[in-house]
Structure formats: structure tokens, C-alpha cells
Image: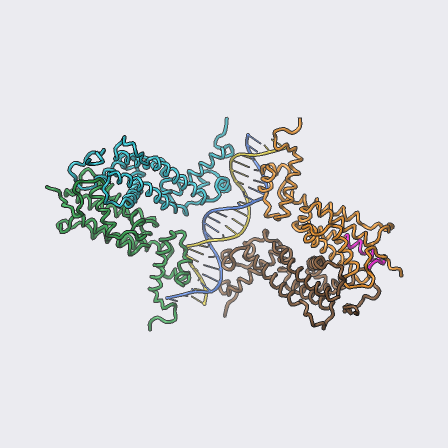
Chain colours: A green, B cyan, C brown, D orange, E blue, F yellow
Amino acid sequence: MGRRGRKKGASGEQSRALLLSIAAKEFAHKGFYETKVSSIVKQASLSQPTFYLYFNSKEALFGELVELFGDQLFDLTKQSRLEPGIESSSLANRISSGLTAIFRFFVEEPDLARIGFYIADEAEDIKNKLAAQIKDNLIYEQQHGYFRTNLDMSTVAESLVGIIERLAMTKLLPGHKTPEILASEIVTLFLNGMITHQGSSSLSYPSRISE
Amino acid sequence: MGRRGRKKGASGEQSRALLLSIAAKEFAHKGFYETKVSSIVKQASLSQPTFYLYFNSKEALFGELVELFGDQLFDLTKQSRLEPGIESSSLANRISSGLTAIFRFFVEEPDLARIGFYIADEAEDIKNKLAAQIKDNLIYEQQHGYFRTNLDMSTVAESLVGIIERLAMTKLLPGHKTPEILASEIVTLFLNGMITHQGSSSLSYPSRISE
Amino acid sequence: MGRRGRKKGASGEQSRALLLSIAAKEFAHKGFYETKVSSIVKQASLSQPTFYLYFNSKEALFGELVELFGDQLFDLTKQSRLEPGIESSSLANRISSGLTAIFRFFVEEPDLARIGFYIADEAEDIKNKLAAQIKDNLIYEQQHGYFRTNLDMSTVAESLVGIIERLAMTKLLPGHKTPEILASEIVTLFLNGMITHQGSSSLSYPSRISE
Amino acid sequence: MGRRGRKKGASGEQSRALLLSIAAKEFAHKGFYETKVSSIVKQASLSQPTFYLYFNSKEALFGELVELFGDQLFDLTKQSRLEPGIESSSLANRISSGLTAIFRFFVEEPDLARIGFYIADEAEDIKNKLAAQIKDNLIYEQQHGYFRTNLDMSTVAESLVGIIERLAMTKLLPGHKTPEILASEIVTLFLNGMITHQGSSSLSYPSRISE
DNA sequence: TATGAATGAGTATTCATTCAT
DNA sequence: AATGAATGAATACTCATTCAT
């Protein structure tokens, strides 16, 4: 017969989701230690024992959030892997759309983003994994002549991760820039560099210069 | 035969310095909350009350470390400000030496670096300040024709901070790269971009193209 | 078969009251600083965290007791204010019954009395307030001719407070005298003084000596 | 060659006296527990070890102050014992001068007074002793016909102590009344009572009402 | 599904006091 | 006569977690 007087119509799974989202916000803004179980349940109008009905521990809940972020980010980057044969879009566009996807995800889940990139101890692992994937992509492209060969692609990849992280926090999440614009700016910068070139204005590079 | 291992002979200022350095290591590796006063003093072979002889609180000690980092970093970046008239060294060299100085500082004080860049709540402030200074420099150079005008220098500055942060943690502190090499790689990347240009190989750019 | 000795069954409000009364006894006998939270909860067969379930701090609990005393005492003295028109009872009787009420309260709550009169920092405030009320009463009576006019009623009121305090501790609480007897003795002394008068034996004074 | 660079010309006994007087002030105003050894020595421009050069413990110093008060007060009251044969002064005057002496002592040593009457645990003992002496005097006088016989002189004595204590704190030490005035008011009140008598104005009672 | 009541285990901090000089 | 440096012993308070209902 459905929900009754129980709680606020909470169907269990609903309480769980509520706790999860409140916790995400708290963790994102105050960190792990300053986020108290008592505070989370209070905001959810639930009691502390109820918390343990759905999560084994505060740490477990936190880990769940981190995993959520890590998994989704991984899915995202997996998709943006280069499909070797397909050259339908230009290199710049492909890189840009990968970044855009990541930034969009961050905008959709800002709390998760902060947690997985800043708060969690595993943030390092997550970024390392991201860097590794980016590096793979870059090396592939480098080997196909898109990039100069005197670049250490591991360093470049880590740089990109650093940029993603920093711009996400300073430009994206505060709402100063959109995912698209940010992605485009990064691509422009990375591909062309900062100095004034003769005719390097187009976003869709001729790529594969000459041959 | 003078003071030896005995705490009693310790010069006070020595005990303080000892606590400070042990604390820095602990904070850097375990974070603020997982660093216990009891653990710090144990490693210093001192008692807990002695801790409070030199610091008002665990938080105060932590703050001192953060301030130390922030001040030194600020001094460093202040020095690397551009001296308008002096064009003795090339742009690339100047930027590179600024980065090198920062990286060297990080290598000298890896614990402070981790604390001030990662652990502290004020890390954000510190990075913002650094970004602001970099941005000022970049804009100055941009206005003098060194850089393209279609770049948002705030974004570029933030990107640089993100890169510094990330490469410091993944390449520098683990010992994979030296400050000099890292700085040079960043400069190359940022100035030239990734794509293969015709004749963009020299590190010391002719700058100020044309005229 | 319902709740029994188990803490678990305790009604919460019961635990709170228990802590309150144990604390009152401890504070009254050992003072604020020598009363340890650990000792209070031990006597209540509760744990220290439970203490903080009901009180924000040791000081807060203490303050609650002081307030309890102050409020009840204030209520008591308010009631004993003179009802101008009503002269049903003699002056002596009225004063006496006021004192009796106070002393009865002290007998009922000896711990609160010690705390609010001796232990608390606010004891001075409480006594000042009491003195002020007594003074008001006395002045009213003085203006209506009951008392000599060459008496500083503020001094008299303070004296009464001093007497109440001292006799409560030395005669009343040890059980040497009843509230009634003590009150009557005070009234006799204060109204007649100590020296032998001709015909000053009656307790119910004719008051308002003739015209 | 006398005092030299040592301290501030402190001759040991001077340091001791200094600590004693600073401690008295602190204890009187902040109580035993809120008075810290560290605070006392700081005000004396001495170090903590020096404190223990002169006193075995904080408690010992406190005890010394209490004893000082108790002894002086005892001396004072001993003197005011009635000299049976000597009836040179009137009863009122004799009582009054006893009270005056006490109040003068309080004015001279306000810190000791607060400590010995309010702060110390032994305050009760001291007051009891004072009450006992007063009671002895009163009984002697009562037996010689000066006072009514239906007064419990123990109660009267305790009342006097309560009054002394209270008026000392509220009228004397704040400077509102002089020892002489206060003593005279108490005597007037106690001997005559509050109600308007026919001819009870003189301070020097005829005493020993004929018969 | 939910909670009122309770707690184990910790953790920073304080302060009187002492040692070696 | 005096102190710089150090500490033993305590104590209030916190928080994640659990039991019985």
C-alpha cells in the first residue's frame, strides 16, 4: 500500500539517496573530518541509527561518493578515446569535446567533483588514472604526427590534468566560464601556445601537417 | 662537555624548530586531522606540555607552517616580477627562471609545499595569490606584444598554477624531474603549443615579432 | 515487564534529572572545581558522553542549578511583597512568614541553597537582588510608620540578608532549628532589639503606634 | 655591598612579600582555582621556580594568607573581650568599638578579608570561631542583665557574624560606609530593634536597667 | 523503516611542580 | 637568589557507532 506515516514518505531507498546527497554537499564544502554524521542526519530529518541502516560507516559513505565520481569520470574518458579510423572531426575538436564532456560532468556534479578531485585521499589515484588515459591518447596522436616529438607526453598529460583541476575550481564551478568555452581555450592554448604565430587562428587545425 | 642528548640542555629554540619540522612532515603526509600532537612530541622525545610551551595549539603550529610557505612563495614570485626596462634575458628564459625558482623552493621544502598547496584550507588563497601575480606578469607581456591578444590571461595564469601544482606533485617531488627541466618543458609547451610548427625550436624567442 | 534498572529503559528526562541532582549535591559539597564530570556520571551509572547529551558543559549544568535557585528564590520573595491594603496579619507575622518561606525553601533544597548562596559567582548578584527586595519592603513599612526613621534601610536589608545566609548555614541546614523558629527569632531580635524593654513581649505588635 | 644586579633589588624576603601580596589580590578577586601560579609570578617579574623557593605549593601560600587573616582577626576579637570589672564605657560603646576594630582591619586588609571570609574553605571555621567568641561575650552580658533572657545568644552571635560579613562586603569594602558608622548602625539596630520606641535614642544605654 | 538512549575510545589542552644550571 | 626548559597527571569534551525497542 505504499508509503504511509513512516517518515516523510521515505521509501528507504529515498532516505538513502537523501543522505547520500546531503553528505556529498557537506563533504565537498567542509571536508571529511569537519563533516559530522550528526549534521548529515539532522539535515535529512533522520536519526543517527538510521544512517547506519544504509551505510556501514561514515567512511563507507564517503568511499561510495568517491567511487561514484571515479567511475563516472572513467566512463567519460573511456568514451573519448580516439577511435583510430574515424577522422571525421578534427583533432582540436576531438580534444575539445573530451574536455567539454569532463567539464559538463563537473558542472552536473559539483560536489562529487570537489570530493573526488580535492577532498578524497584517492584523489591522487583518480587523477593519476586520468593522466594515464590522456597520456595514452596523446602518445597515439603524437605517433601519428599530430604533435611535436620533443614533448614528454607524460608531462603534458599531467599538465592537462593540473589545468583541468584548477580551471574547474576557479572558472567552471564558480560559473565564470562554460564547459565549452573553457575546453576551447585550453585547446587553443595547448595546440598553439601563447606566442603570436603567423596564421594560427583556426580552431579546426589542418592537423597532420603536410605529409 | 657541553649539552648532549639531554633534553634539559636543549636550547628551547631548538626544541621549537624540531617540533616544527616533525610537524611539517606529519602534516604533509597525514593531513591535519590524522596528525596527532601526541605523535609529534613522541618523535621529538618531548612531552605534550612542552608542545604548548612553544605553540598555542595544534592549529597555531599548522598555521605557522602555512604562513611560512605562503610568505616564502610570495617573496619568490615578487622577485620574478618583470623589470620593465631590462630585456637582458629572453622572455622564455625569464619565465623559465621564475618557474625554476618556485620548483627549487618546493624541492627544498617539500613538506611545506604539500601543506601550503594541498593540505591547508588556505591553499586556495595561496594559489589565488600566485595566479594573480602570474596574471599580472602575463598581461604586461601581452600588452608589449609578446603574446597573442586572443588569450584570456586569467585563464592562462590559472592554468599555469594548475600545472605547477600538478607537476610538482607528480614529477618534481617524487624526483622524476629537476626544477630546471620541468620549468623548461612548461615554457616550451606554453609558448609553442603542441602542434608541430615550422621553425619554432629555439628556446630564446626573438619575441616581439615583426616591426 | 517494563523498564527496570537498565539504563536503556531510562526515560532520558530521568537521566537528566538524576545528573542534575547528583551534580547539585557534588557542587554544594565540593565546589565547582573539585566536582568532576567523571564523578557525577559515575554516581549516576552513566558514561561521560551521556552527560553531554543533556548538558552543553559542566558550566552549563552548574548555571542551570544557579538559575533554578535564583528563580525560585525570586518567586518566593515576590509573593511576600506587602499587599498595601491588607493588614489582616500583624507586621511581625508578615515578616516572619516571609522568612519562614525562604527557610523552608532552603530546607527543601539544601544543595541549591548552598550553591546559589555560597558557591556560585553569581551568589553576590542573587543576594543583592534579595537585599533590594527586602529593602523595598522595609522602606514601605518605614514610610507607614512601622519603623524608626533614623535607620538606613539599605543597611538593615543587607543585614537581614547576612543573617539569613549565616543562620541558614549554621542553624537551619544542620537541623538545629526549624524555619519557623528561626524566622521568629530573627523577627523578635530585629523588631525589639536586644536590650530589655518594659513590655515588649508580644510577637504581634500593635504596630503603628497609636497615632 | 647590598643588592646588586640580581633582580629588581629583591632581597629574597622582598620577593617573598611581593609574591604574597600579589597572590592575595589575585585570590581575593578570582578565587583559588582561577588564580594561576604563572599569573602571580608574571606580575612579580619572577619565574615559576622562584615561587617554589618561597612557598611549598600554591596551596601553602594560600593557607598562609588564610592563617594571617585568622590570626589577626582572633587577636582583635580577643582584645575586645569584656573586662569584667571595667565598666568605664557603656555597653553600646564597647560593642561598637569591637565592631569598629574588626571593620578597620577589613579596610586595611581587604584582600585578606575576602579570602578569609569568602574564598577559603576554612572561612567557615573562622566565622565559627568568631561567632563563638561573640557568643561568649553576649552571654556574659546577658547574665549581667544587659540583655533580655529570652534570646538565644548563639543565634544572635551568628546573626552578628552574618551581618559583619555582609555589610563588610556590600558597604564597607566598596567604600560606602566607614567602620565607625557601620559599627554604630549595627549597634543601634541590635540594641533597640527597628520599631519605634518611646525614648530609645541614646547610644550610650543606661544599660543594666535598674530594677 | 526507524529511533531514543547510551557509550568506547580517543584527543587537545592545562597547570602545578621540578631538574639542572 | 634565580631561571630556562621540561613534565606528570589530570580533565573536559567529541564523535562515530550500537543496543533495545
Q: Quadrant of the C terminus of chain C?
A: bottom right
Q: Which quadrant of the figure has residue B101?
A: top left
Q: Nearer the viewer, residue E8 or D61?
A: D61
Above or below — where is B22 with respect to C161?
above
Locate residue A191, reporting x and y percent: 20, 43
| Left or right relative to D176: residue B88 | left
Q: Nearer the viewer, residue C63 or D64?
A: C63
What secondary structure is the stretch in magenta mostly built from?
helix
* Residue D143 magenta-highlighted: yes
Locate residue A51, reporting x and y percent: 39, 60
Q: Which residue is located at x 31 percent, y 51 percent? A: A116
Locate residue D182, reporting x and y percent: 74, 53
The answer to whether one can see residue A78 in this image is yes
| Left or right relative to B109: residue C105 | right
Report the span colored magenta.
Answer: D133-147
Q: Which quadrant of the figure has residue A193?
A: top left
Locate residue C140, reporting x and y percent: 70, 65
